[in-house]
Every structure is written in structure tokens, then in C-alpha cells.
Image (tube, helix red, strand yellow):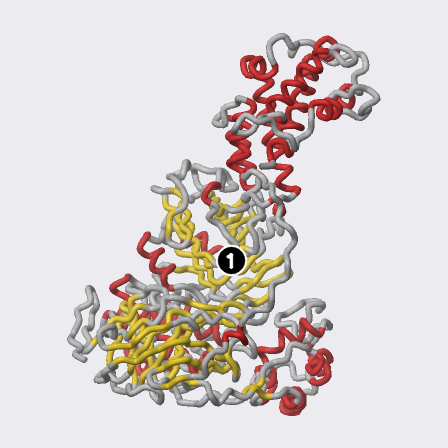
């Protein structure tokens, strides 16, 4: 295979022998062939724009976050532009006593990378400690990530912030690629594996008593200050679910519960952490001993095996545009009550989690009835940095819990409560809402800009949402890379009226009266509005912790160093996402030939996964013609596999019905057939009209134009509460309430318009007379006139062929409900509406009675059922 030098626009350094890979989320990756053993895949970031460590590098440095010590630097001036970039982005941020300056400054511990007497010397000392092409791999990052003098309670958060500092330096220095190395994993065979049993009783007899006795003051949902995970909960099932991913069934010493005690000295209850760790190790080993292993079928054709965390190659974040990020939340910590701001822009706007919340596997939080809120002091940086530019973007990956929330419910809000704000991204039913305080809007950011009701853009699934604001375009909302709002009626204006005493909150307002329910996977606040290309770029990159898994099949096919590669992520706390497999050899001289692949399945912990086998019908041939620089795509599909032991312990492998010359056991169709289906309840022969059909029917029956202002306004307001489908079993009480509101509006317009009401009820009825005169007494002709016309035009309608309906109520029944006569239905509608005025009511009450008769019939099954 011949790889020639490829020129990438604006790339500062050309590399020999390059190729391009398309990742799962569409990010173009540049792969540099470094040896026969591995391929370095580097994001061609400058081709896409300035990026940061959330997935790439900046072409411009982050805002200067200089500390007091840094501003007083009196040594020699930086000798080059790169030294200046180092000073602004790394040295200035680390020189303070609460970072690295207390040890690694002049005369301190080596390496003295923040020495204060000469910035050029500090630059020279620091260079061997960083990797500007892959900032996350820098020694400075790995050191703090491993726990060395992290200034926060989360080592990973310190690592992310350090990565942001180095990334900003790299962006200014011209080192603009972020390498992802596809390196051959250690080969291991799929073996017998243990899996957590569904029943928690064994856990309750071994591990749980220790946790409940010593950890419940914090890690319980009933603690005074609950801290997730709740593995010490009094509810055994809750505790078991929370503890699973903290336990290693194969090696108890590798359990996170044990490491927290033995290595991190976290709240040891006896005062001797090794003794406490030993006690827990014994309990975990006893628990594991009670679990039987699952042996692998020896007849299966198997790839080599991998674990996600141990063998996966991190693929997260390559190519995100974050040049102007001033607050960033990736929710990587996974425990505790703090969501760290890892933007690297000081002051860090960390958020405190309160109320009902939980951490979501694969990075994220769930807030059923909780929130994450920063202090007003640290939130002030949003005010200062955004008002300085006059524009911003709020970017989030969110999964709303449902489409019934309103208020609007506060997803992300920088406000003083529900009545005063600087900005808010909220939810109202199927809509995203953007509120912004400016010189052209009110103090509460109203009127809001929202996605269109009819589009029903917001869905209870993971979505990428961006709110842009600038003084030219005003507010815009992008969902999954597409603009979903029309022009802002309040475009223009300035942000000079913003209040710097407000606080940033996620999942609610600071006043706690706009609860939003759902998952939040990422939040980024930019002090420049993102362009369409930048929004698309960040959407394509995706969200969460992702890995490449390289399943070796070289022992099965005649191709050296050959792999079937998936991009895999923990989709949520209960499952994994396997996506878009492709075949690749790391040997650049390899030829493929013709290799048949049929019936590929994913195995987990010694068995094929029960569900999610989207590739079981795969039938392709790997060949030289289809094999390109980035291998050969095997399928464009993804699939969900259930999580069992957790990402650190679950062992994955692939099985094949056919792979080259190897044939797996034939699948016996009789063994996979589902059981005979259970008879379902009879399906109704009738249905209900949908929202548009209801509106059209009411307009046709009454003669009121559905574009009439009052009708159109009511319809747009309640449209999402009307039935969305015809299945009568899905009809809810909320649907009936909306139907009633719409019926009342149509009948009001009908009765108040003299032409329409004469056409409908016939001339001669005394709409302008009092009740006694208009309706007469007893079973009067006037009453019968109203009821008969309502029946003829709403209930007794013929079908399309002109045949009268036989399954509806007759005129006498309707008459009894609406006007009596007395003795037939003493509780009829007319009597109830006139009981308050025995001496007679004026013409207003006359119209009200007719409207009520009209609406009660128009909003009934006579119009709804079809």
C-alpha cells in the first residue's frame, strides 16, 4: 500500500505517510503511520478550526487567567512567541501557592517548571513534561490525575484543567493535532467469567453489612448530606446496584471500594486503612466465591477478548471546538456532590449538586428533582466575560425525561430566580426555550424564543442543543446541528443590563421553582457565538467517554495484525453502545484477499449477549477492492448491549458463524424461536381524531374559520395536549381537557358572531334577549330550536355516502341532557345554568347557555370518535 504525503489546509506541520479515517461521529482524523506495530490517529484540528482538550487543541489561547504572582513577574522577557504562550497559558495558572508554586518554583523541588526568576528557563524545564500534540498524555497531566497535589477533590478534574492549560499553549504554538494511537492490544483469550447475580442476597450477607455500618453517614440516600453512589443505602437493592461497578469479581484488590481505603485513605473507620481494606477484601472474596463462572462454548469461532477500560483506546472528544469556552462541565468525576468546571478559565465555576440527583455512567448526571448550582461570586465570570464580547453560546448535550415539563423548566439558567435572569435554556413540552436579558427584552428575558410547536423538536432522547446570542441575530436555537427557530423578534440590543449577582444553575432555577427532569451529559458556555460550522463540528464529535476496541482476528484470517474495530461507549448506567465496526490491519503492507464474514455477534462475560445482536445477519466479504486507507467498513449500524459487571470488568469478544475458512456451530432455528405470542386484548374498531383532525372538524361543523385569531391562538397553545394518534387506548384525561378548551373557543366565536350563529341556529332566536324571553318556559320551541340544530349539525351527521349514523345518541337523549324536559333529567344543563337567577338572567347569560350547550356537544365523542 502506497501512502504519499498529503497536504492539509492550514496545517503547520506536514507528516509523511498519512491517511484519513472517518470516526463514528464524522470527525476527520489524520492517521500517521509510525511503525508496523501501531497507527497514530490525529485529529486534523486546524482543518476544522481551533479546538481544545475536550477534544483537540486551540488555535488561540484561552483568556489570560494570570494570578497575582504572575502579574508581578520581573524576570527576563520571554525570548520567543512560544515562551510567551507558555507563560500566559501554563505558568501564569500554576505559579500560585495553591497550585504548583509552593514546591516547583525557584529553589524548590525539581522539576522547577514554575520557577519565578526566569520564564525562559521554566519553559525549557517544562518542555519535556508536556506533549503538545497530545496534551492529555503530558507528564504534568498524568501526575495530577494520579493524585499528585491535585488542588481539587477530584483528580480527574485537575487532569482536565491541566490538559486545558497545555492545550491552550499548544494552540498558540502551532502544535494543532491531537493524536489518538491505535495500538495493538495485549492478546488474551475469552475465558470463563463471573457475572453479578440479579439477586442481592449474597451481597447483603457479605459486603453490605460493612458498608452500611461504616459508610451510611455519607453514601446513603437517607444521609443528612447524601453523597452518591448510595452503596450503603438501607435499601439492599439500591445499595447493590450502586456497588456493582465498585467491585472487581476477579481481583478484590482492584475493587474501587478497596482502593479508596488502601491507597487513597478515604474515611477509614478504624483509623488503620490497611486493616479496613483487608476486611473489605475478605468480604468481596466471599461474595465472589458464591458466584459460579460461565464457561465459553468451545465450538464457537472467537476473536480475542478485551475489556473497555483496560484495553480500550480513548477516542473521546477528538475535534471539539472550544476556543472561547469559559465554563465547561463534562461530569467525569462519577461520584460526590461537585460538578467541576474544567475549562481552565479562572475562577473555576464549580457546581454543587443538591436534592435528588445521581451520576450517569459514561459521564453525566441525572436530576429527577435536584440541581447543580455555582456560587454567585464565581458565576460573576460569566457576566464579566460575556458582557465584554456582547455575545455567547450555551451548548449542552441533554436527554429530557419527558415531554410534559413546562414553566419553562430550567435546564441551564444564569439567574436570580424565576422572575429575573441573564439567560436561560428551558423546556416547555416539546419545545426548547431561550430567554435573554438585553436592552430590547425585559428583566426576565422575555419574550422567549422557542422552537416551533408543530415541529415537536424536543424529544425524550439525547440531543445536542445550542443557544446562540449576538446583537445582530438575537437568539437562535440549534438542535442536533440544525437551526430550529425563526428570526428573533427582539434581535439587537446590548447586555449592559446584566446582573452580576446571579448564579448559574443546571436542572432548576436558583429559586428552586422551575424543576427540570432529565440527564445532562455536557455543558459548555462560550463567550462568542458559535458559527454553524462549529456547531456542526461539535455535534458530530458527540459526547461522553468513548473507546476504540480492537478485536484481534489475525489468528483466524491470513492477514497479519488484523482487527475488527468498534467505537464503544458506556451509553448510560445500564448499557454499552457498540458502533460502526470496520476491519483494519496495522500492517501497512498487508493484503486482504477475500474473507467471508457472516453472522457476527458480540459476546460478554463468557456468552453471547442475549439482546442487541444487530450484526447477526451480517454477510459481507472483506476484499482488497473495498479495503481503503482507513480499512473496510463492515456495517453503518450501532447496537446496545446490556452492562453486567461494569466497564472495568466486563470482558467482550466476537463470535462468527463464518469467518474465512472457519465455520461456527450452525444456529438451530428452533432454539431461537420466541415462545408463542400471548393473545392481546381485542383492539377497538374505533379511534379518535388527532389534533389537526379535531381542529378541522370543529371548524367545519361550526363554520368558524380555524385561522380566526382567537381560535388559532388557543389551538397553538393547547395543540400538544390534543391526541397525537388515533389509538383510542392512548386517549388521556389531559386530551379531553384540551378538547374542551378548543370547543369552548369555537362555540364562543360562533355565538358572538351574528352571521355565523344565524347560519347555524337559524334566524329568530333571541340571543340579545334575557333568558326567560329567549328560551321561553317548559318544553318550548325556542329551546328545541337550539338543541335540534346542535344535534343535526354535530351529532346526527350522515356519513360520506349520506347514510345517517346508527351508533350515536338520538335527539331525545341529547335533549334530555341539555334541556330536560323536567322529569326526564332534572339535572339537565339548562336548569343548572339558570338556577342562580330564578327571576331571570340578562342576554349575557343567554349566550353563555347556548355556548355551554354547543361546547358540551362539540367536545364530546360525537366529534372525537371516528
The count of marks equals 1
Q: Residue at x 45, y 44 (%)?
A: 455
273 left or right of 463 in image: right
Seen in the picture, residue 258 relative to 837 is either above or below; the reply is below
Choose between 84 and 179: the one closer to the eye. 179
* Quadrant in the rendering for residue 382: bottom left
- Location of residue 864 in the rendering, given as x and y in whole percent from the top left corner: 60, 35
Q: Is residue 698 above or below residue 765?
A: below
> How far across and how far down the image is residue 467, in percent?
42, 50
Pinpoint residue 353: horizontal percent, then vertical percent. 59, 63
Residue at image mark 1 = 399
Q: Residue furthest right?
A: 823
* Residue 76 in view: no
Q: Quadrant of residue 525?
A: bottom left
Residue 164 seen in this snapshot: yes
Front-most of 344 and 705?
705
**In the image, is 46 to the left or to the right of 186?**
left
Horizontal arrangement in the rendering, residue 464 relative to residue 583 (left or right): right
**Residue sitting at x 33%, y 68%:** 23
Which residue corresponds to the image point at 56% horizontal and 14% vertical from the top-left?
Answer: 759
Residue 130 rendering spot, x and y as whole percentages? 33, 79
What residue is at 49 percent from the left and 42 percent from the top?
445
Q: Is residue 820 above or below residue 442?
A: above
The answer to which image quadrant residue 123 occupies is bottom left
Where disc 1 sits, the SS reads strand
> Is 45 or 813 nearer to us in this picture?
813
Q: Is residue 34 above or below residue 497?
A: below
Considering the image in quadrants, where does the C terminus appear? top right
Amino acid at each position: 500500500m502506497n501512502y504519499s504525503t498529503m497536504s492539509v489546509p492550514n496545517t503547520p506541520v506536514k507528516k509523511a505517510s498519512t491517511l484519513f479515517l472517518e470516526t463514528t461521529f464524522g470527525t476527520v482524523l489524520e492517521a500517521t503511520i509510525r511503525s508496523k506495530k501501531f497507527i497514530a490517529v490525529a485529529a486534523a484540528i486546524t482543518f476544522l478550526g481551533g479546538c481544545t482538550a475536550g477534544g483537540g487543541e486551540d488555535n488561540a489561547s484561552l483568556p489570560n487567567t494570570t494570578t497575582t504572582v504572575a502579574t508581578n513577574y520581573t524576570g527576563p522577557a520571554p525570548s520567543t512567541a512560544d515562551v510567551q504562550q507558555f507563560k500566559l497559558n501554563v505558568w501564569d495558572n500554576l505559579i500560585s501557592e495553591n497550585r504548583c508554586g509552593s514546591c516547583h518554583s525557584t529553589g524548590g523541588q525539581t522539576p522547577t517548571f514554575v520557577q519565578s526568576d526566569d520564564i525562559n528557563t521554566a519553559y525549557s524545564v517544562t518542555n519535556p513534561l508536556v506533549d503538545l500534540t497530545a496534551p492529555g498524555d503530558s507528564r504534568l497531566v498524568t501526575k495530577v490525575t494520579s493524585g499528585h497535589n491535585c488542588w481539587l477533590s477530584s483528580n480527574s478534574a485537575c487532569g482536565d484543567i491541566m490538559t486545558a492549560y497545555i492545550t491552550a499553549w499548544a494552540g498558540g504554538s502551532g502544535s494543532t493535532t491531537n493524536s489518538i494511537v491505535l495500538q495493538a492490544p495485549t492478546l488474551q483469550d475469552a475465558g470463563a467469567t463471573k457475572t453479578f447475580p440479579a439477586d442481592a442476597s449474597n451481597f447483603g450477607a457479605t459486603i453490605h453489612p460493612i458498608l452500611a455500618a461504616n459508610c451510611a453517614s455519607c453514601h446513603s440516600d437517607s444521609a443528612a448530606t447524601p453523597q452518591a453512589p448510595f452503596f450503603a443505602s438501607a435499601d439492599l437493592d439500591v445499595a447493590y446496584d450502586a456497588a456493582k461497578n465498585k467491585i472487581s469479581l476477579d481481583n478484590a484488590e482492584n475493587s474501587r471500594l478497596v482502593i479508596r481505603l488502601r491507597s487513597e485513605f478515604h474515611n477509614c473507620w478504624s483509623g488503620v486503612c490497611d486493616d479496613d481494606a483487608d476486611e473489605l477484601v475478605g468480604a468481596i472474596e466471599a461474595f465472589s466465591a458464591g458466584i459460579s463462572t460461565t464457561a465459553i462454548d468451545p465450538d464457537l469461532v472467537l476473536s480475542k477478548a478485551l475489556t473497555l477500560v483496560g484495553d480500550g483506546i480513548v477516542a473521546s472528544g477528538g475535534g471539539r471546538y472550544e476556543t472561547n469556552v469559559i465554563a465547561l462541565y463534562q461530569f467525569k468525576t462519577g461520584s460526590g456532590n461537585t460538578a467541576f468546571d474544567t475549562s481552565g478559565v479562572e475562577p473555576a465555576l464549580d457546581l454543587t449538586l443538591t436534592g435528588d440527583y445521581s451520576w450517569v455512567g459514561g459521564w453525566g448526571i441525572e436530576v429527577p428533582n435536584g440541581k447543580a448550582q455555582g456560587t454567585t461570586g464565581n458565576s460573576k465570570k460569566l457576566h464579566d466575560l460575556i458582557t465584554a464580547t456582547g455575545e455567547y453560546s450555551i451548548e449542552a448535550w441533554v436527554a429530557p425525561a419527558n415531554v410534559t415539563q413546562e414553566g419553562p423548566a430550567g435546564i441551564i439558567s444564569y439567574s436570580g430566580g424565576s422572575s429575573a435572569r441573564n439567560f436561560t435554556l428551558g423546556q416547555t413540552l416539546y419545545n426548547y426555550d431561550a430567554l435573554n436579558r438585553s436592552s430590547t427584552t425585559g428583566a426576565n428575558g422575555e419574550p422567549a424564543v422557542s422552537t416551533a410547536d408543530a415541529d415537536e423538536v424536543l424529544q425524550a432522547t439525547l440531543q445536542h442543543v445550542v443557544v446562540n446570542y449576538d446583537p445582530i441575530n438575537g437568539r437562535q436555537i440549534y438542535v442536533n446541528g440544525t437551526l430550529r427557530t425563526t428570526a428573533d423578534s427582539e434581535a439587537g440590543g446590548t447586555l449592559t443590563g446584566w446582573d452580576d449577582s446571579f448564579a448559574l444553575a443546571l436542572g432548576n432555577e436558583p429559586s428552586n421553582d422551575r424543576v427540570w427532569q432529565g440527564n445532562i451529559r455536557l455543558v459548555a458556555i462560550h463567550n462568542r457565538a458559535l458559527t454553524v460550522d462549529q456547531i456542526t463540528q461539535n455535534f458530530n464529535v458527540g459526547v461522553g467517554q468513548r473507546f476504540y476496541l480492537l478485536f484481534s482476528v489475525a489468528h483466524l484470517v491470513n492477514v497479519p495484525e488484523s482487527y475488527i474495530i468498534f467505537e464503544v461507549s458506556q451509553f448510560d448506567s445500564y448499557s454499552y453502545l457498540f458502533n460502526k465496526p470496520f476491519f483494519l490491519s496495522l500492517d501497512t503492507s498487508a493484503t486482504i484477499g477475500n474473507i467471508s464474514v457472516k453472522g457476527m455477534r458480540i459476546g460478554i462475560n463468557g456468552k453471547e449477549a442475549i439482546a442487541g445482536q444487530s450484526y447477526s445477519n451480517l454477510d459481507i466479504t472483506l476484499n482488497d477492492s473495498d479495503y481503503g486507507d482507513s480499512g473496510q467498513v463492515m456495517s453503518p449500524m450501532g447496537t446496545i448491549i446490556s452492562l453486567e459487571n461494569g466497564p472495568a470488568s466486563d470482558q467482550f469478544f466476537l463470535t462468527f458463524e463464518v469467518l474465512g475458512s472457519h465455520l461456527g456451530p450452525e444456529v438451530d432455528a428452533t432454539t431461537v424461536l420466541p415462545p408463542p405470542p400471548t393473545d392481546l386484548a381485542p383492539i377497538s374498531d374505533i379511534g379518535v381524531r388527532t389534533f389537526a383532525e379535531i381542529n378541522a372538524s370543529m371548524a367545519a361543523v361550526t363554520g368558524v374559520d380555524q385561522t380566526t385569531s382567537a381560535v388559532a391562538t388557543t389551538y397553538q397553545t393547547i395543540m400538544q395536549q390534543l391526541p397525537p394518534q388515533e389509538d383510542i387506548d392512548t386517549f388521556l384525561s389531559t386530551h379531553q381537557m384540551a378538547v374542551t378548551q378548543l370547543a369552548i373557543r369555537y362555540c364562543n366565536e360562533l355565538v358572538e358572531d351574528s352571521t355565523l350563529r344565524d347560519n347555524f341556529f337559524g334566524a329568530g332566536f333571541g340571543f340579545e334577549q334575557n333568558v326567560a324571553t329567549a328560551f321561553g318556559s317548559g318544553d318550548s320551541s325556542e329551546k328545541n330550536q337550539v338543541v335540534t340544530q346542535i344535534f343535526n349539525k354535530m351529532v346526527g351527521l350522515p356519513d360520506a355516502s349520506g347514510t345517517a349514523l346508527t351508533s350515536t345518541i338520538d335527539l331525545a337523549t341529547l335533549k334530555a341532557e341539555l334541556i330536560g324536559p323536567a322529569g326526564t333529567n332534572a339535572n339537565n344543563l339548562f336548569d343548572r345554568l339558570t338556577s342562580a337567577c330564578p327571576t331571570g338572567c340578562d342576554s349575557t347569560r343567554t349566550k353563555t347557555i347556548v355556548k355551554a350547550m354547543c361546547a358540551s356537544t362539540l367536545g364530546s365523542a360525537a366529534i372525537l370518535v371516528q
